[in-house]
Amino acid sequence: MLTAKEIRESFKAFFASKGHQIVPSAPMVVKGDPTLMFTNAGMNQWKDIILGIRDPEPRRRADSQKCLRVSGKHNDLEEVGHDTYHHTMFEMLGNWSFGDYFKEGAIDMAWEYLVDVLHLDPKDLYVTVFEGSKEENLERDDEAASYWAKHVPADHIINGNKHDNFWEMGDTGPCGPCSEIHLDSRTPEEKAQVPGRELVNKDNPQVIEIWNLVFMQFNRKADGSLEKLSMNVIDTGMGFERLVRALQGKHSNYDTDIFQPTIQAISQMSGLEYGKEENVDVAMRVIADHLRAVAFSIADGQLPSNAKAGYVIRRILRRAVRYGYTFLNRKEAFMYKLLPVLIETMGDAYPELIAQKSLIEKVIKEEEEAFLRTLETGIRLLDKKMEETKAAGKTTISGVDAFTLYDTYGFPLDLTELILREHGMDADIEEFNVEMQKQKERARNAAAVETGDWVILREGETEFVGYDFFEYDAEILRYRQVKQKNKVLYQIVLDKTPFYAEMGGQVGDTGWLINGDEKVVVIDTKRENNLPIHLVEKLPQDVSAVFTAKIDAKKRIQCECNHSATHLLHEALREVLGTHVEQKGSYVSPSALRFDFSHYQKVTDEEIRKVERLVGEKIRANYPLEEHRNMPIEEAKKLGAMALFGEKYGDNVRVVKYGTSIELCGGTHIPATGMIGSLRVVGESSVAAGIRRIEAVTAEAAEDYTFVLQDSIRELRAMFNNVPNLALTIRKSIEENAELKKQINDYVKEKVQHLKKELVANAQEKNGVKVIVFKGNANVEVIKDLAFQIKGEAPMDGKIFFVGGIKDGAKCALMVALSEGLVKEGLHAGKLVKDAAKHIQGGGGGQPHFATAGGKNPEGLDVAVDSILESAGLK
């Protein structure tokens, strides 16, 4: 039986023998493409070739691509673990042809690999072809059917509808018919009862699609119409996990040697056997799957966070932790301990897992611990909601409360339902779904973009000239209208441009397109499918004119100072902290820089000073920019340039060198380091486990930062009569202030004790209740402490009712504290305060035993106190 590793290598070897270049997997986390957060299909890294933006050579390629599907239309998250074949992170084996072979070649090679190389039984294979579409005026794909007829009988060729057999990149763009290969892996008895063709695309877990051959031959326009592509493209994708399952004779992907080592490790760790109980099995499958997704994402540079791609990764990890918490009784962090097993299984094919092992472990462990604390907080909040609901005589908590637990505290709905069931309660799921839909609508509206078709004026590719020029004559190749948040903008593509399109952490250039007296403002430059796009609020009057494309030089130079400074900063950090330091992200704008790097503890003030001094030395050395464009990547590595994990590099790269600082970088840089002037670190913080962030300013911004500090020190000196040793004087003043505060606190405590004795002595007995009333000027916190002292001194069955009407400067407050005896009788401090707060033009509430309300009408305090006593039957 072939192992998963052997199957992966056999695929690559087969297509290499057919003239395909075997390329490495692109990072799973997508950078530089605003339309996509994660690689969700093998073709993602070839979008610019398919769209005709980049040269297609070499025209035949193949690889094993790591993919992630957890959001958008490809959302498999909720099925993961519950069935046999859905995953979040998965591998897609694929082969491509860009204007080379088409349908016949793709079909023949697929059949040869599956039957002649892997020896799958032809009787178990079924294929689908596009049945056509009247509304699209598309005929049945008889061409593909005729090529399949060479290999399979007619009853194994099945018509498929537009949903299953017409592939589209998106609402617009390249598309075309596709042909799926399905495998029937049922038992002989099951096959004898029902033919496999009747179960194709019927969600039978044992009759599944393993390979999809996409024949891209059309372009979908914004109006829905189709036009022929200039180049036919073959894009195939075969689910690696499903293929391994078939070849290893298993009925579940999770029973293969891809997942079983991890599942057995989970079983051993939890003391529970896999295959005995469904809930336990699902939990183990979820954890085994999600561990891969999270580990690969971190290795590719995406840390868990509360925004965008980081939020998706955090959500996946928390889902796994929750399953372990609920069904495997894992109350402590455990997933990070499984990483060595994953590396043993996949490290050979993906060495980034090995290289990033320490970071991945630390990040997962910290995230697990944080979420376990969140679960404990959520359980306490849910306990409170259940208590309040039961007190109101109900058994259903509101959907709004359930959604708040989910949305604000990250508490999963299914865990909420599980805990509620254990207490004979439930949640209003319909109301929860309404709240969820509202949130989705808000997100959809915020992100909704209406995009028109490209108006193509002339063919060609964009040439970036911004390394050498700040302005350049250019013509418009294409433009289109976009609408977002009801604002109409235009995207323009130029044949030549000095504008740097946002990438690698460096923001896009702004500037102007100039034609005579007309100046069209370029408000930003973005990159989409590797295409530099200039964003403008209005089109030029004559789009066919020759323009002077001119960037805002001052902003560009400020940006370049900050970008070049990040290179010097990176090198200095490695010198001071150690060679374990690696860049994990950066942001470079004209005003400041931000640099994220791997390091496992806070960078001390002394270390920051050393880093600043080292960078300062490199700046004063005035190293000139040594730039190598289109250098072979292996030659660049020999030169000493570091390749960053999570970045996709081509065969040729750009190397930026300042002195001993050598980096692969596509950004723009200053001619010499002296232009940076100076660098000042303005912030150091933690981003995630093992990741620190430094924020800094350079050039004019560094001067301004220094001026602000000087002005602040000057003002402080003036406050202390320009003493020579300011720090000593301030420290002495703080110590004197602390001593005075202590004396005041002692005095206040003494006064409180006198006041307490006085209030208790003047207490009145009403209906067996000792009523204590305070009215007057005081600090609210002091009276709160007093109230708790009085209440706390009551015996267990004692009945003490404290009410305060407090003037605190221009504000006023009400306060009620009740002994346990009164609470048991049904009195509720929160309700009493809430009802009386209207008299002081305020609001408030609280717990049954203690509550407060603030207001802005001190004249109403007497009436408010009386109303509280009256409501309690103590007036």
Image (cartoon, rainbow, N blue to C red):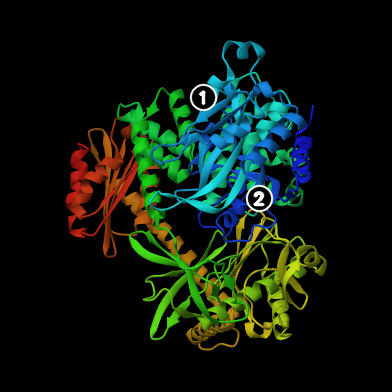
| Quarter occupied by the N terminus | top right
Q: What residue is shown with label 1?
A: 202
Task: Give the mark count.
Answer: 2
Of tags 2 and 1, the one toward the viewer is: 2
Residue 190 picture location, percent across and down: 61, 13
Position of 806 compared to 754: left or right? left
Q: What residue is shown with label 2?
A: 100
Considering depth in this image, is 156 or 655 the residue closer to the camera? 156
Position of 851 compared to 17: left or right? left
Q: Please identify the residue farthest to the right as the structure is shown.
A: 638
Q: Quadrant of residue 102?
A: top right
Considering depth in this image, is 203 or 717 the residue closer to the camera? 203
Considering depth in this image, is 744 or 50 the residue closer to the camera? 50
Mark 2 or mark 1: whose residue is earlier in sequence? 2
Considering depth in this image, is 683 or 605 the residue closer to the camera? 683
Q: For mark 1, does the 10 Å Cα neighbourhood hold few (<14), some (14 to 19), or many (20 or more) residues?
A: few
